[in-house]
Amino acid sequence: MKFEVGDKVVIQHSNDEGEVVEIINDKMVLVDVRGVKFPAYTDQLDFPYFKRFTEKKLFPSEKKPKKYIDQLPPEKPVPGKKKERIAQLAEGVWFTFLPVFDSDEFGDDVVESLKIYLVNNSSLGYLFSYHLNYNKAGEGEFDLDGQLPAGQDFYLHNIPFANLNDNPSFDCEFELMTPDKTKAEHYEASLKLRAKQVFSRIEEIKKKGEATFSFKLFDDYPYREAEIETEPINPLSVLSNSGFRIYEASKTRQHLEPARSVVDLHADKITDKPGALDNFEILTLQLQTFEKYFDLAFAHHLPSMVVIHGVGTGKLRDEVHEALRAKRNVKSFINRYDPRYGMGATEIFFQYGK
């Protein structure tokens, strides 16, 4: 069910705002508009939050006369109409977030909370167990079990936008509604979010005029893993016979990819097609590249390394600095003027145990 009792809604063909006061069935709810209660199909309703945020504010002389619900002829739902948030997504299972906007004391629109949905844009139906977990153990956790048929979505719950500061983890365990011997018995997938990451996606959908943003959990439900032989085997022999090279642990470092003392994270330096990626995908690739060469530099015992992040908006620099603060093997780092890079680089100094 897309709506719950108490949800604020807008009537699509009249633009009237009301409130859901009763759930009639899977397709209809009872709506209260200025004291008048009437049944309405759910696909003729929408949430008003994004409409309030994006609609053009008119001067008093420019306001158009309203049409009320009782002045319009009843309209029947269009059969087979696919839900918009499913139609706009690629195949797979997704977490979709609907920002709920409200006005602050200055009249500015701010995000108060996020409505969270599981969206199944695939041909398989799933049973799922959902768990919300915060970094602060035992605080604000939420659990829910449900069914997610093929081509449908499932409303999970709301979370306050401020709770994203606790770096929540959205965890799901899936099973097939119709068992298949060739498929895995269960599959676990999770999504971890930070407030900066979500704020960036909200800014993007505001520019595009969209109401929701989504993160993919998985493309296809996995197949069952092959049975492992019960007879004792030497795993090193299996790897060697498969063409893998076996090295002594003491000599591992010499077989690693070479480290870099200077790493340039500009998009055109780490991908051949930067124009094919959006801002979020580029940032993700930049951070993955940083983590890779940071680990290589530490594994090769480099005393320091320089990461070139550029100036720009400072978002990439802030993300790199935030990651460095959480690493125990970082002695210090500094972002200062350098004649080669200006203020667009950070130098990192490593510390190694005895």
Image: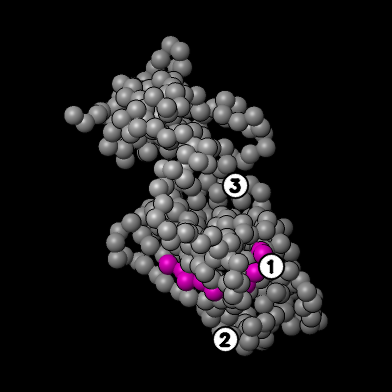
Q: Are marks 2 and 3 in contact (CB under 8 Å)?
A: no
Which of the two marks, 3 or 1, is nearer to us in this view?
1
Amino acid beneath label 1: Ser
Q: Is residue 68 magenta?
A: no
Q: Residue at x 65, y 55 (%)?
A: 210
The crowd level at tag 1 (other Cα within 10 Å; few <14, some 14-19, many 20+) is few
Mark 2 lies on residue: 22
Label 2 residue SS: strand
**How far apart are the alpha carbons under marks 2 and 3?**
35 Å
What residue does disc 1 label?
123
Farthest residue to the front: give it.
231
- The dominant secondary structure in magenta is strand
Q: Position of residue 303 (x, y in %)?
A: 30, 21
The quadrant the N terminus occupies is: bottom right
Examine the rendering and report whether any part of residue 3 can be seen.
no
Residue marked by disc 3: 204
Tell me which numbered mark, 3 or 1, is placed earlier along the sequence.
1
Instruction: Judge depth for marks 2 and 1 and give the one in front.
Output: 1
